[in-house]
Image (cartoon, rainbow, N blue to C red):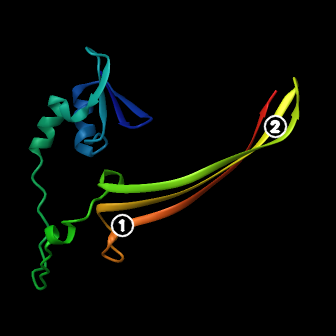
Amino acid sequence: MYLVELRPGKEELYRSGDDLAAAIRSGDVDGHSRIYHRATSKWISITLHPQYKAIVAERPAQPQPAVDRSNWTYLNAQSETLYVSRNRQLSTFSNAAIGTKVSWLWKKEPGKYEIKLNGAYEFVHFKFKDFTDLRSGDKYAYSASILQLYVTGTF
């Protein structure tokens, strides 16, 4: 018996190797399916199963579609992406920040409670050395103003 997960949440039990082979040939079991391996008590990819490998090897290779060679475009991807990082967090950058915080005692009842109003302001600036803004072609940079207002209480 072969327990196969056809897709997440849908399992099928094949009672014989012939039933499993028929399901592979019909496409019900494909490369995304998993099979339960009893010896290890784990789900493994069906592509590791010898019967699946044999059936896939029998199939003739799918012919590639013909390429339209009437128009050609030459792209130099290396020059286009030489200074572009795909992820800002992986880029080299410098930053600067300045800020201030204030706290004001609003109400106080000695021995009972104390309520404070708090505020903070921070200005930050980031400048990336190897991350290009594709809209302008310049190195990406941004500034932000951060304002925090909050109340704290001690009881």
Please identify the quadrant where the C terminus is shown: top right
Residue 52 in percent (x, y) is at 18, 35
Q: Secondary structure at mark 2?
A: strand
Q: Which mark is residue 95?
A: none
* Along the viewing direction, whichever of 68 and 72 lies nearer the viewer: 72
Q: In screen coordinates, is 107 left or right of 121?
A: right
The x, y position of residue 14, in whole percent, is: 32, 28
Where is residue 91 shown, x and y percent of the image?
A: 30, 55
Work out whether mark 2 precedes mark 1 in sequence or the reverse, and give the earlier one. Answer: 2
Residue 16 percent location from the top left of the image:
26, 25
Mark 1 and mark 2 in contact (Cβ < 8 Å)? Answer: no
Front-most of 58 and 103? 103
Q: Nearer the viewer, residue 32 or 102?
A: 102
Look at the picture and state if 1 lies above or below 4. above
Q: Which residue is mark 1?
A: 140
Residue at the image point whose x is 38% and y is 31% from the top? 12
